[in-house]
Amino acid sequence: MIYLDNGATSYPKPAAVINASLNACKKFSFNSGRGGYSASVKTAEKIYSVREKVGSMFNYEPQNIAFTMNCTQALNMAIKGSVKRGDHVIISSLEHNAVWRVVNHLRNDGIIDYDIADFCFDNDETVSNFERLIRQNTSVIVCTAASNVFGVRFPIDRIGRLARKHRIRFIVDAAQAAGIISIDGVKDGIDILCAPGHKCLYGNMGTGFIAVQEKIFLETIIDGGTGSESTNPNQPDFLPDRLEAGTLNNCGILSLGAGIDFVNSIGMDKIFNHELRMTDILYNGLSRNENVFLYCPKPVKSVSAPIISFNYKDYSSEKTALLLAKYNIAVRAGLHCSPLAHKFFNTLDRGTVRLCPSVFTSARECEIFLNTLKKI
Amino acid sequence: MIYLDNGATSYPKPAAVINASLNACKKFSFNSGRGGYSASVKTAEKIYSVREKVGSMFNYEPQNIAFTMNCTQALNMAIKGSVKRGDHVIISSLEHNAVWRVVNHLRNDGIIDYDIADFCFDNDETVSNFERLIRQNTSVIVCTAASNVFGVRFPIDRIGRLARKHRIRFIVDAAQAAGIISIDGVKDGIDILCAPGHKCLYGNMGTGFIAVQEKIFLETIIDGGTGSESTNPNQPDFLPDRLEAGTLNNCGILSLGAGIDFVNSIGMDKIFNHELRMTDILYNGLSRNENVFLYCPKPVKSVSAPIISFNYKDYSSEKTALLLAKYNIAVRAGLHCSPLAHKFFNTLDRGTVRLCPSVFTSARECEIFLNTLKKI
């Protein structure tokens, strides 16, 4: 199989990730920090070491990393935990349903109002689009680091500065960025960073995290046992306990630790460069095929993630994907859970076919894809 | 290690569970139902087969099983998704913080009021205690099937009938029951069943589910991409999509499938009988030790789960557990995230030491534990 659906989840997982997961199932399947016996204590140390790895990669304190089932859960915790009745929220025009459906639910419930800031290929314009929408009661800006459909990136450092200037909480969805694009929570002014563990960080599916800067307080959407302050009828005030109710996914978390080690051992920049070389080959080939419709310029390092969307002939995006599937090529078609992005790029009617390489994608695989496309 | 902390999570996991998890990491780490390629379709089939296994074990429709990170998340979705402003909720006096902190949060927010129905060793009395608290605006009863501290069980079938009679939604926390005690969602009148996958069902940590009877509608606490109705700004109305936003924990879910197969292959009843034989040995030995304080009668099949709580000499429960840990015996001490239960049994000051055998616990291990206890 030629797998170009790494935007959904990276595949294959590195051998070290699979081993770490297996090892965790066998040796570290204990409730961390809730038992005094050696196996529980050792498990807690292992889990903590992954908090350190995440914290170190994105510049957050290890104890301020809480593990979630996926990026979506983290975004729900971040957004719903940040707003109060009467607040105004700004999101970008390229947000995933993990953001759009959340703010929409809050609006339906009469809690917030929200506006959508348009993406622009000119960063100055993008920042202005956010600034123009700020109101007296704007409490939160949510922005994706990179579109999961079109690969274009937002200048999150500049939006972070804007948010800080206006004392607005800044939440970033790093679903397609965490692990390839350098993110510094402090420098970039990201109050809350949400990310999956199973995409560019190469951990198991079922992993994600929410990383919170110091002194940021969140209301909880999930309450329960934390093994701490058990007589307190409320969630503890401190992290990560406040955001981690119930039993954690140890196998997943330790696989994520191995995934981060894998990324660090190669180097985030080197992985990014490799993937851009692959999108280069893909984009150049697609550009030369007169039956292909492309929607964005070729991905380049400073402003893109390695993601390409296209359509073919007059086919629906699903038809193209199914025809490619017959040749054992895995791509994803449709709206990719991001109707806002498709509305913005005028592709809501047919969706797009999406190509996302990973560190394991080879130039030869990209060539085979391009040649196969010509046959369908 | 002699592991008697299976109430936290079962250990070891059966070989078939570890293999299923490993196999899933290698072969079924694709986004199920969101890609048209064969690997994604096969993954979706595998995930669906686990919904069937869960549905079949507890009598729910497979599509009405939604997978969660743990039982706590499921309980939050069930309770918060069921209430509206002005509602009254009844919980039992033995609820875990996964229930108590949830209803408390809702009360703090001015959404609901709640009352606590006392457990009684006489089932008639217990049911009366619930009935007495029912008001005009009581919309939900939440009850644990078995106390995670003391192992005593609630007559959930009778409480289910009571709830049905009064048209009250009935939510059951099956954290310590699912996999050993037969539960029939339809017959027992359980509108929503919440359970972990990693305790008596022997799946990986990081697994749980919410099982919902037909025609039960839930508001969502987590919104996001579902790969379905992507242009809908709200969560889809249908299950499981409505309750499954974002990427699932495939490795965990497929391990849970293997765990259920494991339980079925031995037989739930046989496992339960084995564990009761172990609690028999433990309880008899503890009863003969004059330094031991026990709080409940010996576990018997009809009214107990195989869980024993005790204290030793004038030691804090933590001291006892730490002294046992030196002999490589793993037990849990403290409040077990269930202050209500300790308040009820008057053990809030020192907590208890908890013993939970699994299918893998041997009589010899129980004897070693009893002999070791005499030495500390």
Image (spheres, coloured by chain):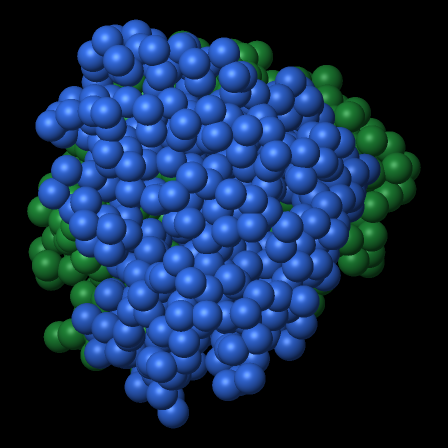
Chain colours: A blue, B green
Q: Nearer the viewer, residue B269 or B44?
A: B44
Where residue B264 appears, x then y in whole percent? 37, 15
Q: Nearer the viewer, residue A97 or B268?
A: A97
Residue shown at 86%/43% (left/top)? B323
Where residue B120 appears, x then y in whole percent? 40, 57
Residue shown at 20%/53% (left/top)? A343
Where residue A130 appears, x then y in whole percent? 39, 74
Residue shown at 33%/29% (left/top)? A287
Viewport quadrant of the N terminus of chain B: top right
Q: How many marks?
A: 0
Q: Is residue A368 above or below residue B11?
A: above
Q: Quadrant of residue B28?
A: top left
Q: Is residue B370 above or below residue B20?
A: below
Q: Is residue A321 visible?
A: yes
Viewport quadrant of the C terminus of chain B: top right
Q: Is residue A191 above or below residue B32?
A: below
Q: Quadrant of residue B366?
A: top right
